Amino acid sequence: MRLRRGVPALVAAALVLAIAGAGAAAAPAAGPFVCSGKFHTPGLLKGTYPNGVVVKGVCAVRTGPAHVIGTLTVTKGSALGAAFGAHHSRLTVTGNLVVDAGGVAILGCKANPNGTGMPCLDDKAKVPKLTSHPVISGDIVAKSAVGVLIHNTTIGGNYKETRGGGGVSCIPPKTGVFGAIKSPVFSDIEDAAVKKNVVISGLKTCWLGLARDKIGGSLAINNNTLADPDGIEVLANQIAKSVGCAGNSHPAAASPPGAQPVYDSAEANPNVMAIYPRVAEPNTVGGTRSGQCTLASPSTPTGSAGPGPF
């Protein structure tokens, strides 16, 4: 299945139908504000929350800007949607964003002219124009989260995603956010700026993508198991320091001849069920390249890595 160009738009189309109910935002209390709701009637964040926010259930930022001061925590099995562009909707967190086990976070939106990126969930135009640019001043830490989708977002600290995912499968789950929108489980970071380091390890999911990101530190992608034949795509990123990839794999049964676990290239024909031929989208790296991210990935099933760098 081809995910990089198609799924974000499909996710947007499905979510705009699903997360459409009206929730109510209460005034912040002395402790962290609790944003709670259900998939069709999410709780809403709008205004300033000086003591942090805890998400229990489903919570959305879609009726205007929201500013969380302190920690924003997506609790176990909960979901945060902050990829709406109408009403100047935008999430700002002066602090850290934490996504707990089984949680889902969808931040930011921007559709690029070439079809990449992700449209805002509330953009109904034939040619999407709305954008939302979340800003997280600290770190994003996802611990055994189901999936994290980041687009057009600035992260002032580190991005760390460990373990989690929906299992080594591209079959949409029957429950949860991805089940409701009938999408395979995946994680991606696209068109984002991460001021420090990105570390992604131990995921068991369908697909993982990093595209057109500006990373101020190093990138490490280790020990992830993906079901999609081109399960990890690292495309056209600007990485100030080093990039290292090791121990990433996909099941042999799901891998056609010549399939690689990590690519710095995209399918030449994304709408065709074939991973080859591929078009190179090399990364700019200020430091060293190592492991599975040393040489450019093959462009044909029988091709070899290189000669250029990853």
Image (tube, rainbow, N blue to C red):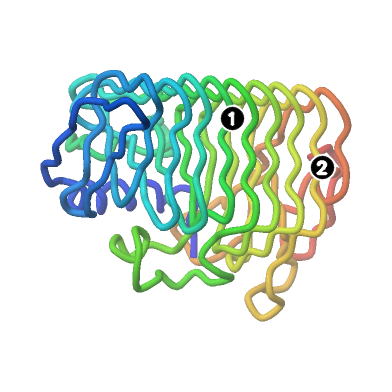
What type is the residue that disc 1 sits on? Asp
In the figure, residue 128 lies in which quadrant?
top left
Q: Quadrant of the C terminus?
A: top right
Q: Going by the image, does 147 lie left or right of 200?
A: left
Q: Nearer the viewer, residue 94 or 156?
A: 94
Q: Going by the image, does 170 lie left or right of 40?
A: right
Q: Position of residue 274 (x, y in %)?
A: 56, 65
Q: Going by the image, does 170 lie left or right of 37?
A: right
In the figure, residue 177 lies in which quadrant?
bottom left
* Residue receiving disc 2: 244
Task: Identify the residue shown where x is 49% and y is 65%.
Answer: 1
Task: Identify the residue shown where x is 36% and y is 30%.
Answer: 31
Task: Identify the residue shown where x is 31% and y is 33%.
Answer: 33
* Residue receiving disc 1: 139
Task: Say few, some or many: other residues with alpha carbon within 10 Å of mark 1 (under 14 / 14 to 19 / 20 or more).
Answer: many
Query: Are circles 2 and 1 on residues that touch, CB within 8 Å?
Result: no
